[in-house]
Amino acid sequence: MIIKVAATLLIVAALSHPAALWQQTSMDKKRVTPVAVGEVAPDFTLEDQDGRKITLAAERGKRPIVLVFYRGYW
């Protein structure tokens, strides 16, 4: 019984991995322009965990801002 459960889990894990990779979208490299050191970042809008819209322009100058884009390698 344990072997059947382990085999089923292994098959599901093996089949779901390619599906997860398929869902990832890649950005067009021509549209991505990095911000140079010392250059002002362009304005953008994000939602916080409560659904409120936050813009970089509204937060700029109030306090230091650190942006971290974690790509989720786990």
Image (cartoon, grey):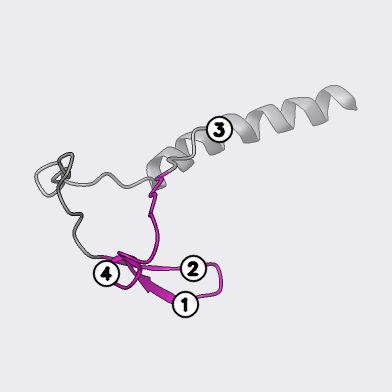
What residue is pinned by disc 1?
52
Instruction: Tell me the amino acid under the disc marked 3.
Output: Trp
The residue sitting at 12% across, 49% down in the picture is 31
The residue sitting at 18% across, 39% down in the picture is 37
**Vertical order, 22 against 50 (above or below):** above
How many neighbours does mark 3 have within 10 angstroms: few (below 14), some (14-19), or many (20 or more)? few
Helix or strand or loop: what does disc 3 sit on?
A: loop
Calculate the distance from the C-alpha at mark 1 to the C-alpha at mark 3. Answer: 28 Å
Helix or strand or loop: what does disc 4 sit on?
A: helix
Q: Nearer the viewer, residue 64 or 16?
A: 64
Calculate the distance from the C-alpha at mark 1 to the C-alpha at mark 4. Answer: 15 Å
Dot 1 or dot 3: first in sequence order is 1
Quadrant location of residue 35? top left
How many neighbours does mark 4 have within 10 angstroms: few (below 14), some (14-19), or many (20 or more)? few
In magenta, the rendered stretch is: 44-69
How many callouts does the rendering have?
Answer: 4
User: Looking at the image, is mark 3 or mark 2 nearer the viewer?
Assistant: 2
Dot 3 or dot 2: first in sequence order is 2
Residue 21 is left or right of residue 61, and the answer is right
What residue is pinned by disc 2?
48
What residue is pinned by disc 3?
74
Q: Where, quadrant-wise, is the N terminus in this rendering?
A: top right
Calculate the distance from the C-alpha at mark 3 to the C-alpha at mark 2. Answer: 23 Å
Dot 3 or dot 4: first in sequence order is 4
Determine if the magenta segment contains residue 33: no
| Residue at the extreme bottom of the image, as rendered | 52
What residue is pinned by disc 4?
57
User: Do the residues bearing badges 2 and 1 touch, measured as CB atoms within 8 Å?
Assistant: yes
Determine if the magenta segment contains residue 49: yes
The residue sitting at 56% across, 74% down in the picture is 50
